[in-house]
């Protein structure tokens, strides 16, 4: 039997790594200067990719998607770790050099960025991966992190999806960046009420705790410490046979205690 004319393919597209960038306040730049500023940004990105020995996105069909005030760049997933380290640090360094050399009449170049990986159909860019990348970029957490960048003299704030963080930083593939350089947060977008995903926020030159005061959607240290991938010491450390005892005379409601203690020792005198 012949297939329907418009049958949808059920094959999962190949994975691609995605980097999205967005220029702060691009729409406020006078129209006559927009092309020049955008050209400066493109030159910075191309030079930085070459310095990090990363392949040109144009090598992938549809690998460069211009968004006007930014772009989405596609890469083979094998270079995912390099898109975190060294790319983010080197991109911030290039923006700092630009700031030192720009004319007073030229606008400041600050960027939000996001890094994600997932199946994506090219060159038509069909798939959730590109949607999630854009929403990470536009999340309140990433926007608020840019305020931390401004106050610290940095020019970049980035959001990593959780899968990117796990495959790169957590896996030990970023030699100059560790978990201490990232802040665990929830990515939410004001006009996308159905979108809510965990992410990791990074501002070059700052630790995660230094960024925390700027974010409304940062995950609390206690919650992060007790998460399944980082179990608390109370749930994993062995209990000595001669240790002390806990006595509770009512219902335990404290979530820290209730979720952490796995073994309650019975007083020997009651045996």
Image (spheres, rainbow, N blue to C red):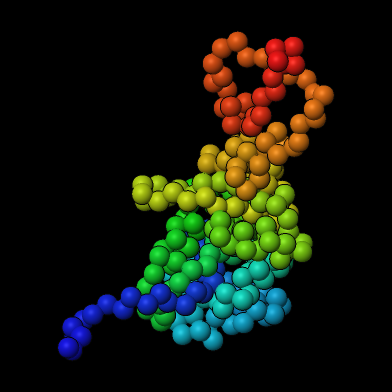
Image position of 158 with respect to 215: above or below: below
At which x and y percent is residue 199? 55, 52
Question: Is there any visible trace of residue 41 in the rendered image?
Answer: yes
State left or right for residue 41 relative to residue 151: left
At which x and y percent is residue 133? 48, 63
Q: Residue at coordinates 66% horizontally, 24% vertically from top-left?
A: 264
Q: How many numbered discs sit on the rendered protein?
A: 0
At which x and y percent is residue 259? 59, 31
Q: Residue at coordinates 67% horizontally, 71% vertically from top-left?
A: 82
Q: Residue at coordinates 80% horizontally, 24% vertically from top-left?
A: 243
Quarter of the image containing the C terminus?
Answer: top right
Quarter of the image containing the N terminus?
Answer: bottom left
The foreground one among 174 and 211 is: 174
The foreground one among 141 and 69 is: 141
Q: Quadrant of residue 101?
A: bottom right
Image position of 6 with respect to 30: above or below: below
Image position of 138 with respect to 118: above or below: above
Question: Is there any visible trace of residue 108 in the rendered image?
Answer: no
At which x and y percent is residue 42? 57, 75
**Residue at the front extreme of this rendering:** 271
């Amino acid at each position: 039997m012949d297939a329907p004319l418009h049958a949808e393919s059920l094959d999962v597209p190949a994975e691609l790594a995605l980097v999205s960038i967005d220029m702060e306040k691009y729409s406020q730049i006078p129209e006559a200067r927009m092309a020049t500023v955008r050209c400066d940004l493109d030159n910075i990105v191309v030079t930085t990719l070459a310095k990090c020995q990363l392949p040109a996105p144009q090598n992938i069909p549809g690998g460069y998607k211009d968004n006007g005030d930014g772009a989405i760049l596609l890469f083979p997933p094998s270079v995912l770790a390099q898109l975190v380290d060294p790319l983010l640090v080197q991109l911030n360094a290039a923006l700092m050099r630009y700031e030192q050399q720009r004319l007073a009449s030229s606008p400041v170049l600050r960027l939000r960025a996001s890094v994600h990986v997932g199946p994506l159909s090219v060159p038509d860019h069909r798939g959730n991966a590109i949607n999630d990348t854009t929403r990470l970029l536009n999340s309140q957490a990433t926007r608020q992190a840019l305020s931390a960048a401004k106050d610290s003299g940095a020019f970049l704030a980035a959001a990593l999806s959780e899968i990117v963080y796990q495959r790169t930083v957590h896996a030990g593939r970023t030699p100059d960046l560790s978990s201490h350089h990232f802040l665990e947060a929830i990515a939410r977008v004001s006009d996308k009420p159905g979108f809510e995903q965990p992410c990791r926020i990074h501002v070059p030159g700052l630790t995660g705790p230094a960024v925390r005061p700027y974010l409304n959607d940062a995950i609390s240290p206690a919650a992060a410490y007790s998460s399944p991938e980082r179990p608390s010491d109370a749930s994993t450390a062995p209990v000595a046979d001669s240790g002390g005892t806990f006595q509770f005379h009512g219902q335990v409601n404290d979530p820290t205690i209730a979720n952490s203690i796995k073994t309650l020792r019975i007083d020997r005198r009651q045996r």
